[in-house]
Amino acid sequence: MNNGRRIVAWFFWLALIASPLVFVRPVYDWANGTWRAEFRADRWQMLWHEAPMWLVRHWTDFLTAAGLIAAGVAISWGWRRARPKLAAATPWRALDDWRTQLLGFVGIVMMLVLVCRHVGDTEIEWAVMACTYMVLAMGLNLTVGMTGLLVLGYAGFVAIGAYTFAVLHTQFGASFWMALAPAAVIGGALGFLLGLPSIRLRGDYLAIVTLGFGETVRFLIKNVIGEQSLVIARDARVPSLMSENVAWRWLFPDGLSRLKTELWVVAVGVLLSLWLVRNLMLSRIGRAWIAIREDETAAAAMGIPAVRLKLLAFTLSAAWAAVAGVFYVAHNTSANPEMFGFSESVLILSMVVLGGMGSLWGPVAGALVLYFVPELLRDRFPLLLSYRPMMVGALMVAMMIYRPQGLLGTLRRKIELTADEEETGS
Amino acid sequence: MTILETRRLTKCFGGLTAVDAVNLQVEQGEIVSIIGPNGAGKTTYFNCLTGIYPATSGAILFRGSDITNRKPFVVTRLGVARTFQNVRLFAEMSALENVMVGQYCRTRAGVLRGLLRTPFARREFSQTATHAMELLEFVGLGHQTHTWGRNLAYGEQRRLEIARALATQPELLLLDEPAAGMNPQEVGAIIELIRKIRDQGKTVLLIEHHMRVVTGISDRIVVLDYGEKIAEGTPKDVCADPRVIEAYLGKG
Amino acid sequence: MNLGVELETIIGGISRGAIYALVAIGYTMVYGILGMINFAHGEIYMLGMFAGIIMLAVLTTLGLTALGIAVCLVIGLLAAMVLAAAFGFSNERIAYRPLRRAHTLAPLISAIGVSTFLQNFVMNAQTKDKLDFPRAFSEPLWNIGWNIGSAHIALIQVIVLVMAVVLMAGLHLFVAHTKLGKAMRACAQDKTMAGLVGIPVDRVISVTFIIGSALAAAAGLMAAMYNGQTRFDVGYTAGIAAFTAAVLGGIGNIPGAMLGGFLIGLVEDLTAYHLGADWKQVAVFVVLMTVLIVRPRGLLGERVADKV
């Protein structure tokens, strides 16, 4: 049990060095004009009295959590046992089959209809944001996950798209749909321009450069466009779809409010992104990206123009972020520089890392766990949301050490080759 | 036709001359082995040929045109492929995908067609996959198509590397110690494989320490020592050359 | 142009540069030995500030200010250095050591995680507003000063500069003349060989982190004293500036980090004077991009040939 003892020792050591910061607070004594150090008895109290009570009270929650984890472990264990047989039964081909895809599509549409009819606005808001993050994470996955380029200033590209829309709107009255293409072009162009000098740099230097870029973008926005929020007028956002049409009324008794229409739009965005990423993974370019990630020298020796392809990944990912940025602003109804800081970039990165770098569904899972779940549990466990950045940080460390492939690993589709697949041409 | 020629190819690392004015001519369809003690500069020579290291001086001519200091991926596209001394497979990809990647420079579907998975892209995908299957069969890995690179046995990994190099449709194949670490049976299989490759019309230049491989299949042997070419000729001549014996065994 | 103000700006820049130099040393030492960028180093700098201020507050509460400003500051400095060293040590053991053999991006992602964690930890544990430095300890140092021509130097700037130089000199002596210092140099050159000749590489790495963190904490406290305040997120901006300084001087090169620090301090203060405080970050980024594109090995760095 040496490991157990080490963990306990580390726990006490960390508690020890953290305590000065947690339990002592410098307070300015206005009466005497001096500083004094105040011992935070309230926190001490919380540690020894309230925390244990809270733990005891919530024992059911811990049981549920333990059960879920056990279930997850059991499923992944069973999956690993069954996978060789499943591979022989070619289930992936089922997903490639157009009939399954159609069924999935119909299922999702039905689910969305039900959600719009029965679910409240708060939850739909969470869903919309979670889906936006899914799209963002999938875009980041192209560079970080598939090509192995760490990008730390992703929020900068989101900001570029967002402000393209905001500026086009305030200056030229552009609407949401009209801004999508310009944002993609400008985002991609700026990604390309940033990539040109930087893509040859070593991995960690490239990361810092992208970080600096993100900050510079934010700074330029603040100083050139202004610190106040740019508001998007009602008619330029995603519209609400109310109609007196009988069929519509039957489907959606309350019509589709703006929020609900946004849910449909972003859901389409997620599905579209999934489709595009899957295509990329199967494509010649996607394979080359993964080869570059695995061993760039060997990839070059196999005739892959690494610099060109890295630049391509960079540009595509930037354009992707910009398009998502347009939606983000339309949903938020305003844009201000504070929305696109480093912590946003880190949050999106953590979704990619947690979900599984280079996997198709990983970013979806990451966004669900890191955005949707804390929101869902915000009443039960408000701390999850307020301490989320700390959780994100700790998770990233833990993931790198214990499970660098993330939750879903590089669960990539197996490429099956039989005559039927070529015939049906799925 | 002289498919490869190096004229006084030299590579220095600071004060160390790793490759010293090596002249070499390889005719099409030949199998030439480069041998020499460890540290003689053989892999460095390969790295210069393929553009991984910029040459300090000298020229490299492939099919008559100068390829000195061209980027590695350009050299491969022109028809020179290689394997590595320490196997450098793409670990997180299956054997099939490894070989499919090798065909990158011979296929055309770009990012737009890839994103949308157009009929052209799908057709090219099928062709690429089929061709990859054939190459895997050719090197004897037909039963391991979906095994991940890092899960293959060592000998299989080396053969996969050869298949991947062949996927780039090279005219000249550079093999860096293809028989290293193999048992006698596997060595025999490698010899057969190299012969099959040559019978397809390709030229093979290999670095090897395994004398059985070297003497068994080489048309010519080139000996390097301390970066210099000290001998060249048929296996019989080279093995009797006193300078070669001295390089390997020392004086006296 | 007001020459006096210009000169003052330069003096200020040099003082600020001394602070950056101390932090840059930490980045460069870790990079030299582990080949990774310790993204969380800026947070250690910030921790030093908070720890030092807390210590000073404690001293005031205990009525020990009678000991004099100098003594109190030294005690605060020591407290900051000790706590920061503890955090730096733990950081390496928990977040970096298990990743020694992982691929190159893993330690960086882990470092980002640690940085995020520490920043938010301090924000939640202490305060998310700015924290003022106890003026009783810094004001007297601002009040004493000298005039050189039309420029004015305050005692505090001299103290910051002298402290930084003392610490840097101490480090140089340590690295050049002690056994442990020699071990550090050996590990920076070739970790595997150093291990094979019997150097306890893990311990050397821990010492590297401890020293780097202590220096950063000292720098932090002095910066807090100089700027009068601090916040939980100063580590982020200062970290990037110090990292740029390390790259400018030549990453892996300790004298280079010192030189880079002074240069970046000058760049920042001159930019702030001529263009406005907001432009400091952009200037630093421009310097970083320029160095990485034009001369990646920095001013004093050596070109390294990679063997394939």
Image (tube, rainbow, N blue to C red):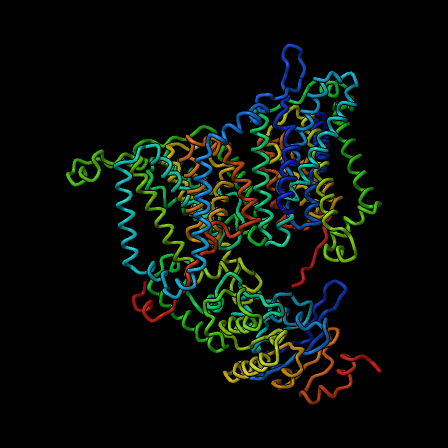
Residue B183, placed above or below residue C79: below
In the visual, does B180 lie left or right of A343?
right
Residue situated furthest left in the rendering: A246
Residue A127, placed above or below residue B126: above
In the visual, does A324 lie left or right of A198?
left
Name the quadrant containing residue B75.
Answer: bottom right
In the visual, does C36 lie left or right of B104?
right
Name the quadrant containing residue A7.
Answer: top right
In depth, the one of A391 and B192 nearer the eye is A391
In depth, the one of A411 and A265 nearer the eye is A411
Q: Position of residue B228 (x, y in %)?
A: 73, 76
Q: Position of residue A105 (x, y in %)?
A: 29, 51
The answer, for residue B169, to whether it is visible in the render is yes
The answer, for residue A187, to whether it is visible in the render is no
Residue situated furthest bottom in the rendering: B236
In depth, the one of C264 and C181 nearer the eye is C181
Rendered-image quadrant of the N terminus of chain C: top right
Q: Residue at x 50, y 31 (%)?
A: A55
Q: Residue at x 63, y 28 (%)?
A: A21
Residue situated furthest top in the rendering: A31
In the visual, does B130 lie left or right of C163?
left
Q: Residue at x 50, y 83 (%)?
A: B200
Q: Position of residue A6 (x, y in %)?
A: 65, 43
Name the quadrant containing residue A44.
Answer: top right
Residue C255, placed above or below residue B166: above
Q: Position of residue A142 (x, y in %)?
A: 46, 52
In depth, the one of A112 and C163 nearer the eye is A112
Residue A123, placed above or below residue A400: above
Rendered-image quadrant of the C terminus of chain C: bottom right
